Image: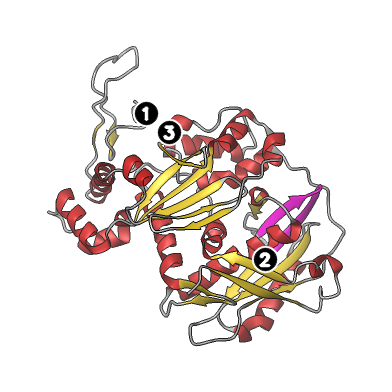
Amino acid sequence: MANKCTLDIELDSSVKNNKFFNKISKVSLEKMDIFKYGILNEAVPKKITERDFEYLESKIPFLYGLYEDFIELDKQRIVNLSEEENSKRISETIGVGVGLLYATQLLDVNPNIIKRIAPSEKGKYLDFKISKNNREYEFETKGTINHSKKSTLLKDIAEKKKNSKTKATKCGIITLANKERNKKPSKLVVSDDWDENTENIEIEIKDYFAYYEFYLSFMLDSTYYNRMHKKIEKNNITKNMIYTKRIPHFYSYKGRRYIGQYFDKRLILDLIAQFYHLDITMELLYKRMTDEFGKKQIFMGIDSKIISYLNAGNTEDIKYYSGEKVFEDKEERSLMLDSDGIIIVSSDGLDKQFNDNFTEIEVKARLQYVLNSIKNEPHECGAPCRSKEKEGEPCQKLTFREHCHFHRDE
């Protein structure tokens, strides 16, 4: 099957005569668009502990595996291959991924102003919002393989819009995907009236932080992520909030440096559990995981220019930042670079940068950290203390990693 497809857009009766919507009749997408936009459905963590390997090591390769194994594109179809419990989750990911891609094309905006709407304690609420020209637009995204559920989903979207108390313009987007046996074209269904009574919204630096924070949660050392998140939550945006020394890796592409994190399928906790027993050593576990899964690795990063703009509080340069959008599918790697400066690269061990920057020594080290956590066996950091009272003495702080967070950048 292909890695891209084009879907027709069906406009519901509530918007079919609206000129704004009629300017787009189709949406074209690459398979990796679904992953890149679909993962925005995951919640931004309020706090990450240093032993939360299920989030830090497992989530991205797990979600990428679902996308890679159970979604296929075929000219005019998005096919959900899962027959199991993951089928609904995959359909939801497709709905979010395609819906947000369409929303950015409809509004002609950079995706870095997409914001997840916080859960409401009263009634239903929509999923995402985007601001443009001092106006705010809210979007509800749905995905299903059951095309007969279209009317039910339209009613649910209408109910959410009715209960929402904001003045934002609201829109519903349903992606009708397919099972393999359904040969009809997939399509996008767009609904809800385009209410022009909206409040004025000015995009601030905190809004860009809210977008990039999700990606940073996988890249930044947990202690420094937690500090950054608290400031964002309290709207206390200061300079140099992203401590780049604690983002350990990079990937270079077309003369630009993208800082971020590497991930490996062999570090997914659910897969480790299949081979784990109390007496297993890291070396034996590494061998069994490698024999079973090989090297399936991912890099996710952010253009270093974006990090500099965020740390400087430079709203104007972020506002006018528009990176090149690139898709590559080669033997040594698959790569997506989006206009927001986010890069996602996957490789099965043939990309030289992966081999140089994310060595098997590091994979083994991370696997040992995970084993330490599973066995609940922290150890003393041991690095020389820097405090005046204990300068030079071995640090006694307990950690599951090689060193505690005070000494990990040494």
Res 101 → quadrant: bottom right
Q: Is there CB contact under 8 Å for labels 1 and 2?
A: no
Residue 409 image label: 1
Classify residue 142 by image quadrant: bottom right
Specify which label sits upstream in the sequence, 2 or 3: 2
Q: What residue type is labelled 3?
A: Arg
Q: For the residues marked 3 and 1, what is the alpha-carbon distance in whole angstroms?
A: 7 Å
Find the residue positioned furthest to the left: 279
* Mark 2–mark 3 distance (CA, rounded to whole Å): 35 Å
Q: Which quadrant is home to the C terminus?
A: top left
Tell me which amino acid carries mark 2: Glu
Label 2: which residue?
140
Between 210 and 165, the one lying in front of the other is 210
Q: Earlier in the sequence, mark 3 or mark 1?
A: 3
Q: Which of the two marks, 1 or 2, is nearer to us in this view? A: 1
| Residue for badge 3 | 246
